[in-house]
Image (spheres, helix red, strand yellow):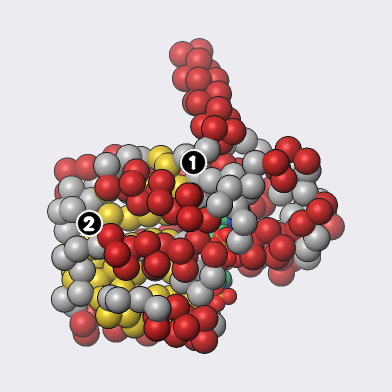
Amino acid sequence: MNIAIITGASSGMGREFARQLDTKLDKTDEIWLLARRREPMEVLAQTMQSKTRSIVIDITKEKEMRQFEEVLAIQNPKITVLVNCAGVGSHGIFRKQSDQQIADMVNLNIVALTRMTKLCLPYMHKGSKIIQFASGAAFVPQAAFAVYAASKSYVYSLSRALSKELKGSGISVTAVCPGPVNTPFLEHAYGDVTSMSGLKKLTIAKTECVVAKAIDDCKRSKTVSVCGLPMKVLYLTTQSVQNVMQKFM
Ligand SMILES: NC(=O)c1ccc[n+]([C@@H]2O[C@H](COP(=O)([O-])OP(=O)(O)OC[C@H]3O[C@@H](n4cnc5c(N)ncnc54)[C@H](OP(=O)(O)O)[C@@H]3O)[C@@H](O)[C@H]2O)c1
């Protein structure tokens, strides 16, 4: 059985991934939707043509991840696509953030994403695709978004390194690096979206565009997917600076 796995499928970009892959995937028998909330996944599944499986799971909980590992071992599927979309961000000054807010970002954005990737890899083959949700925040450290930006730098770095490691196996890894996108994430991160900087508000992208570009880039096995002019400028600028720095180090 060939399957696609999407974490964070109950909302925002994970849900949009499910919608778009529903019509764009061939050679895939089932799409597995993963998140903690069942209802939004079931509502989504009803609108999809593909056979879907809604899996209620908190991917930061080791016990639940072990159960998922067992499901994979029993079903022994071929994973054609893994989309690691689940992620969380809390905006605010580091020393004022609670230990819980910081742990939530590290545990979900870094630990759970790494664990899910490792767990799925044995079921991936030539042509399989891994899509990792990083962020434009990965490119530069961000005051008042310090842990979130650092967690996304981790995802970006991990993805690029894995992409190299896996080259010979024919498995591609794409790090998706959007700026702000109009999903519930922004409200969770900022509480009040009006408190976002004017520049960030101006560059808010549409979920559908970010996901369509990510799918397109992943099909071409591109290592990094950047959507929209402001993010492309930021990406190219930081890349050029890094290239110059590397010459002196
Ligand atoms: N929106 C933006 O501005 C933006 C910009 C750049 C990058 N990103 C990244 O894009 C990804 C998707 O974000 P989004 O904008 O789609 O956010 P979202 O709408 O808030 O969705 C987050 C998803 O993660 C799931 N999730 C949260 N905690 C979980 C856990 N412990 N276990 C399993 N699932 C969990 C949520 O489902 P449940 O609550 O049902 O578990 C939800 O489906 C994230 O990695 C985010 O960091 C977002």
- Coordinates of residue 8 in the picture (x, y in percent): 49, 69
Q: Nearer the viewer, residue 73 or 224?
A: 224
Q: CA distance from mark 1 to mark 2?
A: 22 Å
In the image, residue 77 above or below residue 126: below
- Coordinates of residue 108 in the picture (x, y in percent): 55, 65
Kind of residue sitting beneath label 1: Cys
Q: Nearer the viewer, residue 178 or 65?
A: 178
Residue at x 39%, y 68% (from the top left corner):
18
Label of residue 101 in the image: none
Q: Earlier in the sequence, mark 1 or mark 2?
A: 2
Name the residue tied to disc 2.
Answer: 128
Q: Which quadrant would the N terminus be assigned to in this image?
A: bottom left
Residue at x 47%, y 83% (from the top left corner):
43
C-beta proximity under 8 Å, tags 1 and 2: no
Name the residue tied to disc 1.
Answer: 227
Tell me the SS state at disc 2: loop
